[in-house]
Amino acid sequence: MSQTSVQADKKTRFPIAGGILILIAAGISLFVAIVGMVFLQSHINIDFDFIDYNSEAWIMSFFGLCGFIFGLPSSIFSIKRMHCGFSIFGIGIVVTSALLLGVYAKSFVVSFFCWLPIILLSLTSLVFVSISKREFS
């Protein structure tokens, strides 16, 4: 048996670890979106007279949902070792949405406690998935 076939048959746990990390980051993104929606509901009057479209709640909701919508399938594909390109693309969307959340969030609590864990988990997941891209089908 040649050296290349032995290397191709060896499977590491990097895609599974990357999938679990991006799943956790997607869960945090969903939490950020739900918190943003709760704050959004508290700012809308009963008569719908006041809706601040530039508020932090809209930003939290939108970017949190984007991170969750792309992070969940990306984690599933990474764990199943399928569609490496989509997994990397989804992780990139999660990283981008977290970066934009950090840039546009006005409060320190949102930008530090919500932005930083998503970024760290997503970048670690991106490294794990990129390292093991030969294992994907």
Image (cartoon, helix red, strand yellow):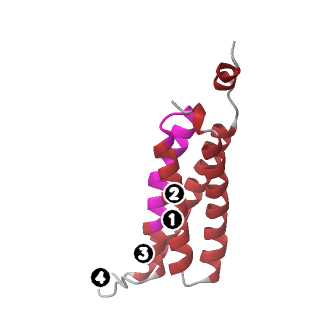
Amino acid at dot 1: Thr
| Residue at the outermost front position | 2
Asked if the residue under mark 2 is in contact with the one under mark 1, i.e. CB atoms within 8 Å, the reply is yes
The quadrant of the picture occupied by the N terminus is: top right
**93 horizontally vs 17: left or right:** left
Q: In the image, what residue occupies the spot 48% across and 80% down?
A: 56
Q: Earlier in the sequence, mark 4 or mark 3?
A: 4
Is residue 79 in the magenta section? yes
Asked which secondary structure carries label 1, the reply is: helix
Mark 1 or 4, nearer chain start: 4
Q: What residue is pinned by disc 2?
A: 92
Quarter-of-image position of residue 32: bottom right
Question: Which secondary structure lies at badge 3?
Answer: helix
Viewer-side label of 2, 3: 2
The kind of residue tagged 2 is Gly
Cα distance in 3D space between marks 4 and 3: 15 Å
| CA distance for labels 2 and 3 | 21 Å
Q: Which residue is mark 1?
A: 96
Density class for disc 4 (Cα within 10 Å; few <14, some 14-19, many ≥20) is few
Residue 58 is labelled as 3
Left or right relative to 3: residue 19: left
Q: State the extent of the magenta-drawn residues as a range.
A: 63-84
